[in-house]
Amino acid sequence: MNNTFSDNPQVGVVSSFSELINTKFKGKVNAICWSRDLKGDFKEIVSQLQLKENITEISVEDLLALQLSEKGILARDIILNDLQLLTDIGASPVLNLLKNYERDDEFDFISTDVYSFHVDRSPIGTDTFLCTYYGASSDIISNDQVEQKILIPEVREKLRELHDGPEAEFETFLKEYFFDLHYQARSNAKPVNLGVGNLWRLAVDHPSQEVLPCVHRAPVENDGEYRLLLIC
């Protein structure tokens, strides 16, 4: 098991898929990691896939069409198994070949793209699953090491100017445009990188959740390198 994760009070570390889906979030733990050291050549898969847009969804058929070495086949089997495991529990996993996400540069005082620390919100009881098979991997951060951006005075003031409506509707405005989902890391914050090959389950903001939602962000991609990411 990865000591970096097991020593972190935010992270629960497990050794099987069954444990991953059945371990309850509690206290400060809002991220569960199935810690894995995957065998296989995931780079070979990435090198053969075709990027059609900055984010290209890869189907099972796309994977099966690849002509792979023994190590490439091993990597493909791992991905296919992960997709099946998640599908079997009612999730809708997506495999993405990713050059980069769209940047939000509309406002100079607040960023609301996935490179910003944020939480996911859902109206139903669900969790976020993700695994980076190749390329740069995401970060999470403890809730006590971040501040909600809408509570930062200068940001809040500019959002009020942007809203330009009745005070009673301001909080609704913040939610409607997802400003309330984004966070600023404190000066002494220490993000945790999720690593390659580990399958993660992150707590989402929804009414039945008993813990705080997991704050996370997408990584800045490595130059000239695509990411291969499973997410749902």
Image (cartoon, rainbow, N blue to C red):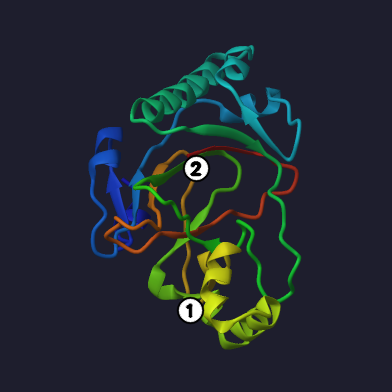
Question: Observer-nearest residue: 117 or 178?
Answer: 178
Give the mark, 2 or 1, whose residue is nearer the N terminus.
Answer: 1
The quadrant in which residue 95 appears is: top right
Instruction: State whether residue 73 is above or below residue 89.
Output: above
Amino acid, disc 1: Asn
Q: Give the spatial CA distance, label 2 vs label 1.
A: 25 Å
- Please give the name of the residue rendered at 40% of the width and 27% of the height, measured from the top-left corner: 87
Instruction: State whether residue 117 is above or below residue 159.
Output: above
- Please give the name of the residue rendered at 42% of the width and 28% of the height, measured from the top-left corner: 82
Residue identified by numbered label 1: 188
Point out residue 146 in the picture as x, y percentages from the top left corner. 47, 74
Residue 50: mark: none
Point out residue 164 in the picture as x, y percentages from the top left corner. 68, 80
Horizontally, residue 119 falls left or right of residue 49, namely: left
Residue identified by numbered label 2: 196
Point out residue 13 in the picture as x, y percentages from the top left corner. 29, 48
How many marks the image carries: the answer is 2
Amino acid, disc 2: Val
- Please give the name of the residue rendered at 47% of the width and 19% of the height, measured from the top-left corner: 77
User: In terms of secondary structure, where does tag 1 sit?
Assistant: loop
Point out residue 45 in the picture as x, y percentages from the top left corner. 62, 25
- Please give the name of the residue rendered at 64% of the width and 59% of the height, measured from the top-left corner: 113
Disc 2: CA contacts within 10 A as few (<14), some (14-19) or many (>=20)? many
User: In terms of secondary structure, where does tag 2 sit?
Assistant: loop
Where's the N terminus, which quadrant? top left
Instruction: State whether residue 197 is above or below residue 182.
Output: above
Disc 1: CA contacts within 10 A as few (<14), some (14-19) or many (>=20)? few
Horizontally, residue 211 falls left or right of residue 67, namely: left
Question: Observer-nearest residue: 148 or 193?
Answer: 148
| Pointer 2 with pointer 1, Cβ within 8 A | no
